[in-house]
Amino acid sequence: MGDYHVHLHPHGPYRGVGPEPGDYPPGHVEAYVEAAAARGATEIAFTEHLYRCVEAEAALGPFWEAEPRRDLADQTRAFVEEDRLLSLDGYVDAVVAAQDRGLPVLLGLEVDFFPETIGAVLDLLAPYPWDVLIGSVHWVGGWSVDHADVAWEFERRGVRRAYEDYFAIEADLAASGAVDVLAHVDVVKKHGHRLPEPPLDLYGPVVDGAARSGTAVEVSTAGLHVPAAEIYPEPTLLGMFHEAGVPITFASDAHTPADAARDRDRAVDLARRVGYTHRAAFRRRRRSEVPIEQVPIDEEELP
Ligand SMILES: [Zn+2]
Ligand SMILES: [Zn+2]
């Protein structure tokens, strides 16, 4: 079992918890590995945010500038400037060093998807020895769709329109084949904005795109800890992925060691319920399928 979506630093400026952004002191990676192992996750793919790395600035560009709603663009610019505290080279070196120490960790990255810049991003990433790339839509134009400070945009835009705008980009990402796994594929529900019925017309192109491009989808327990209070993706959508033969990974989206592999049993339950018996594993971006293990969870070992 693996946790295929883990960050080594919380967001924002340093608040005194854990190492400073960009610092990887001895024992930091080990703390994640131990916490995940206690929950039965025997390997971790670290997947730092590309946009947080200073090296990404040239490839991603000021993507908020084309946003016609200035309040959204201003929030995104301020947020990205405040959060861009990491070095891609420093992060890669820290994870590769952990691999060299024999730890069961994979080198991954959470890649921000913008149709306009994905080519430049892939050029930037080409020299590094990635095990897995996960892809995310955190921005719809210049709107930070999963950020609480601008959640009022759902009312201004209308929930249906917001879902349409979000899933159109997610479908582009799924079809692109640029990444190995789709991260929090229905994160648009994060703050609890819901449609009366699951929007099957918006899900369809995402599922078809992933199936055609050979992209997997993560089952993420992060959704349980936000107002949506539901795993990403919701059961109907995960069932559609299963029907289409799209493989899964398991993900916590932890930003601290204590959250590594959290609620893994609930993700496994959901995956089994919709019919999955296997999950994907990645090495150097080559996928294999392994049975979903029944690893006993040692609650005593939990942090
Ligand atoms: Zn994300
Ligand atoms: Zn993440």
Image (tube, grey):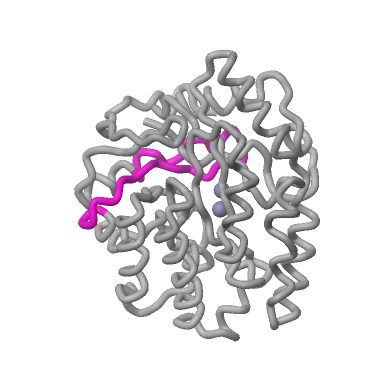
> In percent of the image, x 79 and y 43: which residue is there?
15
> In percent of the image, x 74 and y 54: which residue is there?
58
> In percent of the image, x 60 and y 34: which residue is there?
128
* Residue 287 in picture, x, y percent from top left: 36, 36
Q: Nearer the viewer, residue 127 or 224?
A: 127
- Tally the marks: 0
In-image side of 18 versus 42 (left or right): right
* Residue 60 in picture, x, y percent from top left: 68, 58
Q: Residue furthest top?
A: 101
Quarter the C terminus occupies: top right
In-image side of 8 versus 279 (left or right): right
* Residue 266 in picture, x, y percent from top left: 35, 44
Q: Nearer the viewer, residue 258 or 83?
A: 83
Quarter the N terminus occupies: top left
Quarter of the figure with residue 209: bottom left
Q: Is residue 37 magenta?
A: no
Q: Is residue 103 above or below residue 265?
A: above
In-image side of 289 versus 3 (left or right): left
Query: Which residue range is magenta in the image?
Result: 242-267
Q: Is residue 264 magenta?
A: yes
* Residue 106 in picture, x, y percent from top left: 51, 29
> In percent of the image, x 37 and y 27: which residue is there?
297
Q: Is residue 203 above or below residue 22?
A: below
Quarter of the figure with residue 94: top right
